[in-house]
Image (spheres, grey):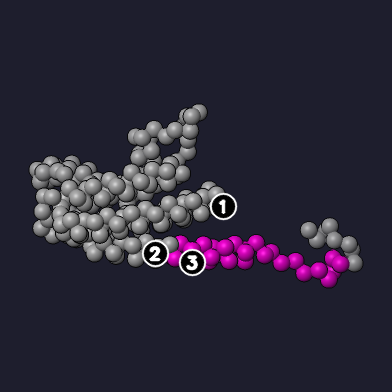
Amino acid sequence: YRADFPSGLQKDAVFVDMGPTFYQIAEDILEKQIQLVISSLKEAIDSADGFENTHQSQQYEAAKFSVEQVIFILEKVHIMWEPYMPALTYKRSMRITLDYVFSRITKDMLLLDDMAAEETLQLQRLIHLMLENLSSLFESFIAKVDGKDKVLNHMLWAQLDEMLPSLRKFRKLADLFDMPLKSITEAWESGELIHCGFTSNE
């Protein structure tokens, strides 16, 4: 822009590119915002007490309330962020947030030992409860696929699994809770569980 200044100012004007500075300020603020959200989510998940003993009515209700709190926080963040953030920034921020949620809950559930049959079904219900109630948030990640702005279910999950590997593992965990040992072993030997992010110890 120097050439556009009057000749008398061109020698005295100091040109500073403020773009990188403002960009870094914005990134710092965004990171703090994401960490605040994750802190709230951590508190909500902690209240589930590790998702232990969900075959007992009181423990199941506590775990369900925890999941509902997580859903509420995520939906609130979705409503606040999506209209104001650039699309790529929104997706990056929401991906970090969702990855924390799915990874943390999956980790807690995998740490459970010696589960009762009813307990596995209750844990499966909790996973399905979360997935069903986050459908509008998931759709905000995916481009519309037809003129009626509807997303085909199989395409939705395929794209989400690629964007969020922790979601693929979370969804597969729900299946594992309802599978016999033989089927789980076959899924491991076929490489399916490795593809979903499971380790041999898990």
Q: Residue 40 carries which label?
A: 2
Local SS, label 1: loop
Above or below — where is 139 with respect to 85?
A: above
Q: Residue 131 carries which label?
A: none
Q: Nearer the N terminus, badge 1 or badge 3?
A: 3
Residue beneath the point at 43% across and 51% down: 75
Quarter occupied by the C terminus: bottom left
Q: Does the magenta stretch include residue 76?
A: no
User: Could you tell me how many numbered marks the image carries?
Assistant: 3
Residue beneath the point at 54% across and 63% down: 27
> In screen coordinates, is 129 left or right of 2?
left
Residue 162 seen from this side:
no
Residue beneath the point at 49% across and 63% down: 33
Q: Nearer the N terminus, badge 3 or badge 2?
A: 3
The reply to whether callout 1 and callout 3 are in contact (CB within 8 Å) is no
Judge by depth and name the residue closer to the eye, 77 or 59: 59
- Could you give the CA–CA distance between mark 1 and mark 2, rounded to whole angstroms? 21 Å
Residue beneath the point at 90% across and 67% down: 8
Q: Name the residue under label 3.
A: 32
The three-letter amino acid code for the residue at tag 1 is: Tyr
The three-letter amino acid code for the residue at tag 2 is: Ser
Q: Name the residue under label 1.
A: 84
Residue 138 seen from this side:
yes
Q: Where is residue 73 in the image (x, y as percent from the top left)?
A: 41, 57
Q: Main secondary structure of the magenta part?
A: helix
